[in-house]
Amino acid sequence: MQAVVRFTIAIGLVACGHDAVEPPPADGPAIETSGLTIPWTALPGLPGQVSSDITVSSMVFRLESLRVVGDTGTNITHGPLALQWSSGQTPPPTVFSDAPSGIYSKVVFHADGQLVDYSWEIDGTVALADGTHSFAIHDLMDLSVSIETSATLAPGGAAVLGVTFQMDQVFDGLDFTALDNDDGLLVLDTDDSAMTDFRTKLQQSIVPSPLE
């Protein structure tokens, strides 16, 4: 396998530092707090079936940094943290309790496993003509995502900037029969020919959550 050529989809933002806060357990009590909150959602819900023939059993994004960006140039940063969907686990909301009041218009995150681990991973099963196969899709390449959104945080108040992973769109066009078969496991890896298109679709699937 050829050496991985690393690149970053540039966002062009400079963030001030902020110590990471350990998130509460996914099954813990809800915490009411002021500031900015980012709830993380997968549609359809994970783990679960995302199409008639594809089921995702787990997904993880290893974020080196997470930023909320204000219209006045304010940047508040969390990180590192992991967003993980698996059996009995979903990512808890991320809270920026010290965010100053103002209008926030962007959520930016950078996933990077630093070559020690994958930046993101998706595992599951797919039904093909010859039966059901397990698959593993993972990427050593770093991935930056910028999500245009809008929320107004009043002094002493609370605001929500939800982010949704539209998983029913990610697998469009992926030919599982062309993936490497590793002793029965279908694998899509960093420098495989189909990864560039899959990575782009994954990035495009991360959008603002619809307003309730």
Image (spheres, rainbow, N blue to C red):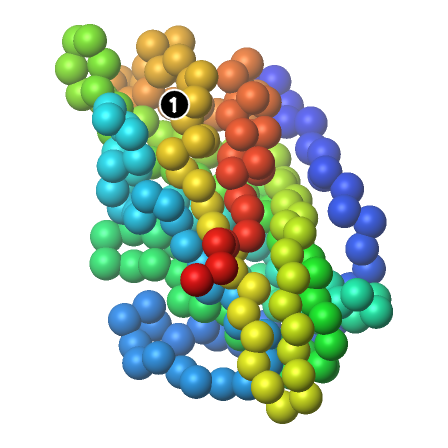
Q: Quadrant of the N terminus?
A: top right
- Name the outermost residue toward the bottom: 156
Q: Is residue 83 visible?
A: no
| Amino acid residing under circle 1 | Val
- Name the outermost residue toward the front: 212
**Residue 111 horizontal/vertical position (percent):** 59, 48
Residue at 52% over, 66% down: 38
Question: What is the quadrant of residue 78 in the picture?
Answer: bottom right
Element type at mark 1:
strand
Left or right of 9, for residue 87? left
Q: Nearer the viewer, residue 152 or 98?
A: 152
Residue at 63% over, 40% down: 142
**Residue 98 horizontal/vertical position (percent):** 65, 83
Compared with residue 183, is residue 19 higher up or lower down, i.e. above or below?
below
Write down the residue under mark 1.
187
**Residue 203 horizontal/vertical position (percent):** 57, 37
Residue at 59% over, 29% down: 200
Compared with residue 123, is residue 126 higher up or lower down, i.e. above or below?
above
Q: Is residue 132 visible?
A: yes
Question: What is the quadrant of residue 88 in the picture?
Answer: bottom left
Q: Give the class, few, some or many, for how many residues have Cα within 10 Å of label 1's Cα (few <14, many ≥20).
A: some
Q: Nearer the viewer, residue 113 or 158?
A: 158
